[in-house]
Amino acid sequence: QNFTGVPFVTIRGFQTSSPVYDGIHLYANGSAVSVIEIDRVEILSGTSGFLYGGNRVGGAVNYVTKNSTNVPLRRLTFGNYGGTQFYGHADIGGKFDDRGRFGYRANLLYQGGDTAIGEPINQKVANIVLDGHLTDTLYADVKYTYNDYSKEATQPLFYMRERISIDTSKRYSPKWASNDLESHKAYTSLRWDPSKYFTLRSAFFYQDTRMRVNQISLDEQANKTFIPRMTNSPWEKHENYGGYIYLDSRFSTFAVDHKLTLGYSSTFHEMLLRGNGTVYLSGNTNFLLSELKNIAEPDWGASFGSGSMATAYTTRNDNILIGDDISFNDQWSAMVGLNYATTAYKLDGIYGDSNYEKSKLTPTASLLYKPIEKVTTYVSYMEALEASIIVGNTYANRGEVLSPLLSKQYEVGLKYDINPNLLLSTALFRIEKTNRYSDLATPIPRYVQDGLQVHNGVELVLTGKVTDNLTIMGGGTLMDIGVEKSNDPALEGKKPTNAASRMGKIYAEYALPWIPGLNLTGGIYYTGERYANVANTDKIPSYTLYDIGARYTTRVLDKALIVRLNVINLTGKNYWQDQYNLGVPRTIAFSVSTMF
């Protein structure tokens, strides 16, 4: 599932949608991270409150964006993401000067057509990067991204009485159920290394986004028909500011080495609405699934979307931190840190007038021991101020601020470098988080918090080259999850919603030795059963998905040529991504990349 281009990622049974962008915390609304600006994705398992504050209890996803290339890059890619949604992508980079001090990178994308289920989509993205060493010790960069995204006939949200299988290869919404977004992002960073003992790092981010969402939600009836609820949000304006400044110092006390970091980070998000905000209409007619895409757009009212923009709410997260990476000897080391975290909300206009601010000093501590050179063991404890949230537009108590609380994580683990290119890691963990959920009330549910969501688990991960020709990325997680310390006795011991106790995934690439340049790819992804409601009466079935693909690299007219083919959900499995969203149908994607 994704919203405005940002996927909802589940790590250790917890869902996170707020991305980290080159080390800066962003809010999900309006963040619009495009795949073409990303160089790599860093997955940080476990509570990440020390660096980024709360709201990422299971882990964080850090999108590291592209920089200039050391050698000239001229790449054109033409392809298809599935259905008829073809795209063209140009990636150009290099250096301005012979010494290689100043560089550039430009990525341009145009995408249009229909998805695999017939959702019209159109996207234009432009990403520009300038970077370089202003002096031998001072590096700076400036990045700008423009994103214009439109998608029609987006699949509805499903509120089910009985969890039935629904054909995911069809769409069930009319074209006017849409998601539109236009975003401008600017980012700049600075790194100064005045000596081998000190490094100063800083970055600043600004984003201005306009977005609009027309959403259909379906209430299943006893006779397997559906009554639609229609939500229309006028153009919203989201402004995201963020930045950090860190000072790293390296020194020794007696025989103990230290890398001490002092720093401050802050993010600010403002949402502005036009007029009276979102309009909700609840239907009274029963429809078959096949009839839903013919529903006419309702009359939203003469005053809908009129008037001037006004602030609906603002949110702020501040972090003042100090951390020390301590090396006692070749075998023993430790990492300790403190973060004075603040989360604040201010509501105006249609959400009412109120202020909320809470601060907490949260510790982080890890002890590491290397019994042999290739093995590292560790034990760690982390706390994070879990940020308060504003209840979203699909709930009856929209705009309500849920108070921030503390989340905790205990972990013990081992990492083993089997060889320089293959890493095995395993961990035992316990995570305690505020239990937040939909009460599934009708006709419109409320979003509430009560008790603790506790995840006790073990995970095993293997990544790297097993042989010269075989590369794998795989792992599994087993968890014992439950609700504790609830005010409602009926919730005590129940399983949290949308959290699978078992997950296993493996992706592999095999380079055929008898056909140089040809790699076969494939993946198997298993997600165990979950519950869709707090009473645990609605069970989301487990599912296994299969992907296959191939990549062929060759040279044509002395230019590199790469052809890719991927089949996603090979068997066309019908499944539920979560309690509200259908899974992805069988999708065939392909592309051709060439240098020029």
Image (spheres, rainbow, N blue to C red):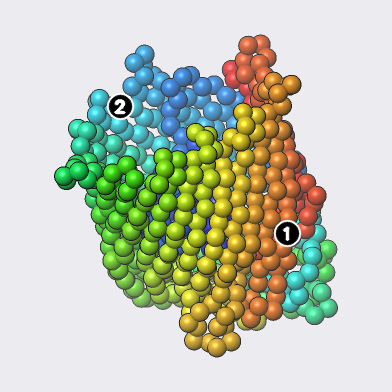
> Is 437 situated left or right of 20 in this image?
right
- Mark 2, Cα crowd under 10 Å, few <14 / some 14-19 / many 20+, is some
Q: Residue 582 location in percent, x, y?
A: 71, 60
Q: Residue 64 location in percent, x, y?
A: 45, 41
**In the rendered view of the protein, which quadrant contains the C terminus?**
top right
- Mark 1, Cα crowd under 10 Å, few <14 / some 14-19 / many 20+, is some
The tag on residue 543 is 1
> Is 172 situated left or right of 421 in this image?
right
Q: Is residue 515 above or below residue 265?
A: above
Whether residue 2 is visible: no
Residue 267 sits in quarter: bottom left
Which residue is rendered at x = 34% and y = 45% of the image? 331
Residue 378 sits in quarter: bottom left
Q: Give the residue at the far top of this rendering.
A: 557
The tag on residue 133 is 2
Q: CA distance from mark 1 to mark 2?
A: 50 Å
Give the residue type that dot 2 points to.
His
Which residue is rendered at x = 28% and y = 44% of the image? 329
Which residue is rendered at x = 57% and y = 80% of the image? 493
Front residue of 85/434: it is 434
Name the secondary structure under disc 2.
strand
* Viewer-side label of 1, 2: 1
Name the secondary structure under disc 1.
strand
Mark 1 or 2, nearer chain start: 2
> Is 9 situated left or right of 592 in this image?
left
Q: Give the residue at the far left of this rendering.
A: 254
Q: Is residue 548 above or below residue 361?
A: above
